[in-house]
Amino acid sequence: MLYSLPVINWLSVLINSFWIIGLSILLAAFSYHYWLADQENHRLKEQLEQPAFQRLFWLSFVFVGVGLAGTSQQVWESTVWIIFTLFSIVNTVRSGS
């Protein structure tokens, strides 16, 4: 056997998938709303101020915050990312109403 330790750290893959999913949600939301602004002849700023985009914007940062808190090596880093994630959760809930 070539390797005595597991080659893939599945916990690391799981934790890192959170921030990757978060950034992909952000990219998809921005891309869609950019296209929608063009189709409806609105300014991009007006489109990005819509509640539909705001919910996805803050939801994506919840995922990013969870992923970065999980990959942090220092306690202070984790604390900063957890506070950022809680702030993002609050804003996600606020943008839903």
Image (cartoon, rainbow, N blue to C red):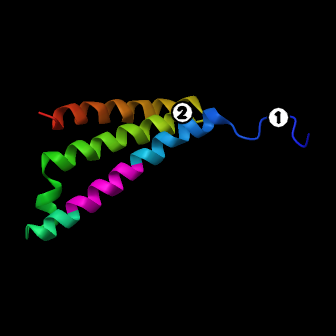
Mark 1 in CB contact with mark 2 (< 8 angstroms): no
Secondary structure found at label 2: helix
Q: Which residue is mark 2?
A: 70
Check disc 1 and report the residue beneath it: 5
State left or right for residue 85 relative to residue 10: left
Residue at 21 percent across and 31 percent down: it is 93
SS assignment at label 1: loop
Amino acid at circle 1: Leu
Specify few, some or many for label 2: CA neighbours under 10 Å numbering under 14, 14-19, or 20 or more. Answer: many
At a point 42% along the width and 42% down the height, the residue shown is 64
Q: Is residue 22 magenta?
A: no
Asked if residue 73 shows in the view, the reply is no
Picture disc at residue 13: none
Residue with the most extreme front position: 1
The three-letter code of the residue at mark 2 reads: Gly
Residue 29, located in which quarter of the rendered image?
Answer: bottom left
Q: Nearer the viewer, residue 13 or 66?
A: 13
Of residues 69 and 40, the one nearer the viewer is: 40
Report whether residue 86 is seen: yes
Please tell me which of labels 1 and 2 falls first in the chain. Answer: 1
Does 19 appear above or below 70?
Answer: below
28 to 12, vertically: above or below = below
Would you say residue 27 sits in the magenta stretch? yes
Instruction: Point out the stretch of residues depicted in magenta.
Output: 23-33
